[in-house]
Amino acid sequence: MWIDFNKLPDDARVWVYQANRPLSNGDVAAIGQALQPALSQWAAHGQSLLASAQVIENRFVVVGVDEGYNLPSGCSIDSSVRTLRQIGESLGIDFFDRSAAIQAADGSVQTIELPGLKAAVSSDNVTPTTMVFNTLVKTKAEFLTNWHLRAGDSWLKRYFKSEAV
């Protein structure tokens, strides 16, 4: 069953899918039109799931499910991944981009491919105080409180000398 994302409980499980490019307003509308009916029918072992999704920063799709209502199964999670793959294929978007996503000085989202991170740190394009998007959040509460992190407080901290963090 579909629920407004804001009505999901704080302990709802979330998954963040990062697009490999900025999403246009048309992309965002198409994603919503495809995801809402899919999540309305999302089920685990015949039990409906209470779920929602939203597009953030025109770059990320955040899917949430209330595990207190019914627990998603491995098969149901695989189903949601397939849905995102299908939406991505129809729109020419890769939602499984694993680049580091940072917030640029102008507020836009920039991505740095993993092989280029050391060079970005060496050239001070990414510093311990650079704001990054924490795509590793696990719950709605964590999403609400730790979505933006300093790079030095994220998984990127390994790229900085310990005294600089």
Image (cartoon, rainbow, N blue to C red):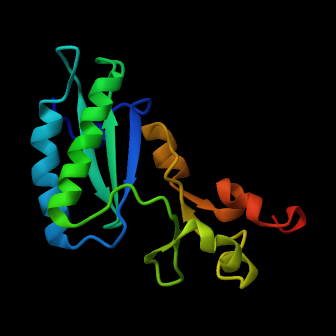
The image quarter containing residue 5 is top left
Give the total of numbered labels.
Answer: 0
Question: Is residue 35 visible from the viewing direction of this image?
Answer: yes
In this view, 26 is above or below 104: above
Q: Nearer the viewer, residue 138 or 43?
A: 43
Residue at the image position 35 percent from the left and 63 percent from the top: 19
Q: Extreme right residue here? A: 163
Residue 111 relative to residue 83: left or right: right
Quarter that holds the N terminus? top left
Picture layout, residue 162 above or below residue 80: below
Q: Is residue 161 left or right of residue 96?
A: right
Q: Is residue 140 above or below residue 9?
A: below
**Residue 61 percent location from the top left of the image:** 32, 53
Note whether 66 is above or below 84 in the view shown.
above
Q: Quadrant of the C terminus?
A: bottom right
Q: Nearer the viewer, residue 159 or 154?
A: 159
For the point 29% across and 17% down, the residue is 70
Residue 92 located left or right of residue 140: left
Query: Could you say where residue 119 lies in the image, as x and y percent from the top left?
Result: 69, 79
Q: Residue at x 17, y 56 (%)?
A: 31
| Image point (22%, 73%), residue name | 24
